[in-house]
Amino acid sequence: MTTTEPTDSATADVVLIGAGIMSATLGMMLKELQPDLTIAIYERLDVAAAESSDAWNNAGTGHSAFCELNYTPEKPDGSIDISKAIKIAEQFEESKQFWSYLAETYQVKELTRFINHIPHLSFVWGDKNVDFLRKRHAALTQSPLFQGMEYTQDREMLESWMPLVMHGRDPQQPVAATRMDLGTDVNFGSLTRGMFTLLQQKPGVTVNFHHDVDKLKQKEDGLWRIKAKDLTTGEVKKTRAPFVFIGAGGGSLPLLIKSGIPEGSGFGGFPVSGQWLKCVNPAVIAQHHAKVYGKAAVGSPPMSVPHLDTRVINGKQELLFGPYAGFSTKFLKQGSYLDLPLSVKLSNMRPMIIAGLKNLPLTKYLINQVAQSPEDRLAALREYLPEAKAQDWQLEIAGQRVQVIKKDEKEGGILEFGTEVVAAKDGSIAALLGASPGASTAVSIMINLIQRCFPAQSATPAWQGKFRQMLPSFGHHLNEEPQLLAELRAHTSQVLGLTETAPTSH
């Protein structure tokens, strides 16, 4: 395909690169804060939320720290560190508040069907793990965010919570579980597409699907010049903007490197692909109604936490087990095998090498995962479903994650397993890197980004008032205000329809 000459430069107040959950959230917030802002959005694929935000590409748990054991590490003295769990639980409450605000303000069907009530369970076996879970439950329930979490070792109770997990299990095996009824399942693909439906209806917003941004540069006047190629016609569009957000999932790192900002120097990425076993037997699916998270094997990375996961996708109940990791040099599921080698630069080579040497167990883990046979995957499933049959499950490819590698003064280079916002000193450009629990905490991530990149506007009474309207807990710590937490949870549950159980398969 030939490339035509660039069209005359357009101007926008904001350019968003990538049409996933992050860009959708930021775009909606900015238009609520200042309705006359002009926004240009560029997405390489022909639909929104087709990569990491898509329902089949992510875990969709609604990461709220209710069941994720890796958020509550055991300290050397045997106590449980719940600080990360509290932070994530608060952030998820903020997400529910913003989603409720949108659902009350706008009539878009996707904004009332993307979230469902699904209990969150943590399940362990073995004396040591049972002791850990008991201590975790005692520590977490000191916080109002985790009030109502149940703990049991009673097998009859466990069977009522998760019959598939208990059927056929060795009666002598020490087992325990916690259950948080407040848990949810979130279809981030549906949510994202709902927000883009709203954005496309707003004046001053242009959404350019099937456009690939290949150049971005800040000129002397402080404005960014973005060049995007229409992958259908070959036409090149140029846009000038004072603010750019790079929310392109695994594609964010190459664009951050291209931006040339000093703050992006030294960042690298390590791609990890994922796979699920998807249940194809409706009778089995109907017997399980929970998200059951276990404990990662010793030496395994946080991303490997196994879970038996009830999902509601397009109104139909599904059941997944995984994740099984794999390795690909692609940064996106629909990316290029050259993504990883082309991302290695002089500025990030040393941190990437050091981080790689320090994470040899991760490399070994990935090699073992890639080498797994169908029998190996079934054996892992049977640790959670002792009576699982191979014919009831099929392998599905999930999304690509790019774990962040960054410079570190002490270590030289470290591998991060969370999300990282990298912003220029002048606040004119920001990029989101990393993976879980990104989507679930997108609202708090974007609120912080707005305050960081639009400091003057964020301090005005008008924006402060709007922040509080979108997020009633803005400026509060819900962990320290149980009454406010109870009121807001009751409100969001009512607005989002979380008082009823999820629809079953039909």
Image (cartoon, rainbow, N blue to C red):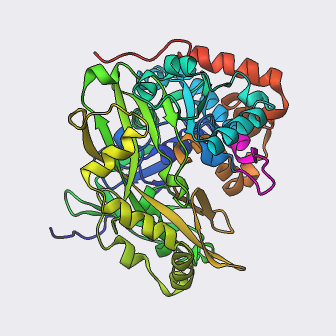
Indicate the quadrant where residue 289 lies. Answer: top left
Residue 427: % across, % down: 66, 62
Q: Nearer the viewer, residue 450 or 274?
A: 274
Does 32 lie within the magenta span? no
Residue 68 appears left or right of 238: right
Residue 449: % across, % down: 65, 52
User: Which residue is outermost to the left?
Assistant: 1
Compared to residue 110, the image places residue 24 above or below, namely below
Magenta stretch, main secondary structure, is: loop
Residue 143 appears left or right of 36: right
Magenta stretch, residue numbers: 74-88
Q: Is there any visible trace of residue 29 in the rendered image?
A: yes
Indicate the quadrant where residue 372 lies. Answer: bottom left
Residue 415: % across, % down: 57, 68
Q: Nearer the viewer, residue 357 or 234?
A: 357
Compared to residue 424, the image places residue 357 above or below, namely below
Identify which residue is drawn at 47% across, 21% down.
Answer: 112
Identify which residue is drawn at 66% across, 34% down.
Answer: 94
Quadrant showing the N terminus: bottom left
Compared to residue 261, the image places residue 349 above or below, namely below
Quadrant showing the C terminus: top left
Does 81 lie within the magenta span? yes
Q: Nearer the viewer, residue 153 or 506?
A: 153
